[in-house]
């Protein structure tokens, strides 16, 4: 009997202690959750600042996650530029398209160049999730000839990137040819108008000269007729 009591006595305080701890924890949470209604004014008032990305006048025609590499000519090795998003952005007015790659966390620009008709995207040998291409890049604030390699999570994304860039390059090439043809037509039209004006000017100058010659001839003829009509002087 004594042993059973002592066992109970030994267990009860432990149980009571747990209950008190739970009650205290509950009271603490209730105190923390209690809304006092007090309003604390901020020490510093922050004003909303408009953040621009430089892409406001452009429309994204491609947006994919990828990892970008740049070939280091001096070290003769590939160097990682970052993990982020590659976009093809089409300008709303000029219709020019540029390729932009930004890092995910810092949004740092790692690639920034126009998609020209001469761009050539090639599949990376031995890796069907990667592509290679050359470009005159402006990511570092100056134009530099760069060799890029981009790696996608899937073969489908890599294929989509390659096909889209090729389509854009073809479209830009047709646009450039159309512009050249339009400029040539405008130049021919301008030359034709100038030649026409020159011919008209020459035509206007010819009658004036003929008229002056005709007038001189008429004056001579008139003078001779008057001379003949004069009475002969008496001897």
Image: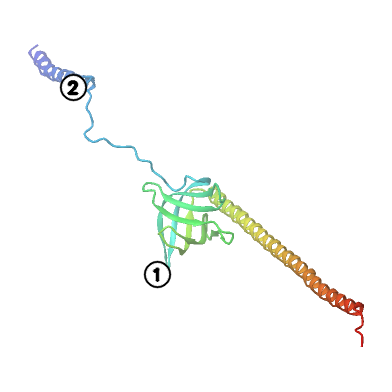
In the visual, does 42 lie left or right of 167? left
Name the outermost residue toward the top.
1
Task: Measuring from the top left, give residue 232's x and y in whole percent.
Answer: 92, 82
Q: Dividing the image into 4 quarters, which one contains the C terminus?
A: bottom right
**Quadrant of res 196:** bottom right
Quarter assignment of residue 73: bottom left
Q: Residue at x 42, y 50 (%)?
A: 102
* Residue 112 in picture, x, y percent from top left: 46, 55
Residue 197 lies in quadrant: bottom right
- The numbered dot on residue 74 is 1
At horizontal 56% and vertical 51% (from top left) the residue drawn is 94
Q: CA distance from mark 1 to mark 2?
A: 63 Å
Q: Give the foreground label among 1 and 2.
A: 1
Mark 1 Cα shell of 10 Å, populated few (<14), some (14-19), many (≥20): few
At x 47%, y 47%, the residue is 55
Residue 60 tag number? none
Q: Position of residue 2 (x, y in %)?
A: 7, 13
Where residue 60 sits in the image (x, y, percent)?
Answer: 52, 45
Query: Relative to 93, does residue 19 appear above or below in the rendering?
Result: above
Classify residue 138 as left or right of residue 230: left
Please state which of residues 13 and 100 is positioned toward the viewer in this rendering.
Answer: 100
Q: Is residue 73 above or below residue 168?
A: below
Under circle 1, the secondary element is loop
Q: Which residue is label 2 attached to?
A: 28
Q: Quadrant of the N terminus?
A: top left
Q: Check disc 2: other Cα within 10 Å, few if <14, some if 14-19, many if 20+.
A: few
Which of disc 2 and disc 1 is earlier in sequence? 2
């Amino acid at each position: 009997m004594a042993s059973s009591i002592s066992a109970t006595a030994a267990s009860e305080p432990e149980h009571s202690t747990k209950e008190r701890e739970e009650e205290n924890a509950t009271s603490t949470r209730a105190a923390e959750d209690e809304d006092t209604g007090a309003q604390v004014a901020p020490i510093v008032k922050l004003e909303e600042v408009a953040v621009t990305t430089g892409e406001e006048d452009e429309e994204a025609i491609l947006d994919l996650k990828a990892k970008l590499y740049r070939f280091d000519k001096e070290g003769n090795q590939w160097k990682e530029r970052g993990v982020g998003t590659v976009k093809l952005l089409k300008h709303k007015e000029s219709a020019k398209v540029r390729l932009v790659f930004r890092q995910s966390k810092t949004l740092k620009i790692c690639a920034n160049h126009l998609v020209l008709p001469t761009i050539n995207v090639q599949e990376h040998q031995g890796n069907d999730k990667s592509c290679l291409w050359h470009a005159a890049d402006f990511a570092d604030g100056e134009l530099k000839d760069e060799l890029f390699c981009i790696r996608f999570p899937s073969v489908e994304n890599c294929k989509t990137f390659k096909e889209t860039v090729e389509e854009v390059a073809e479209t830009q090439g047709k646009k450039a040819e159309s512009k050249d043809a339009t400029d040539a037509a405008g130049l021919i039209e301008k030359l034709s108008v100038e030649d026409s004006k020159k011919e008209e000017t020459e035509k206007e100058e010819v009658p004036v000269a003929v008229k002056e010659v005709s007038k001189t001839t008429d004056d001579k003829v008139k003078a001779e007729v008057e001379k003949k009509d004069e009475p002969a002087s008496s001897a």
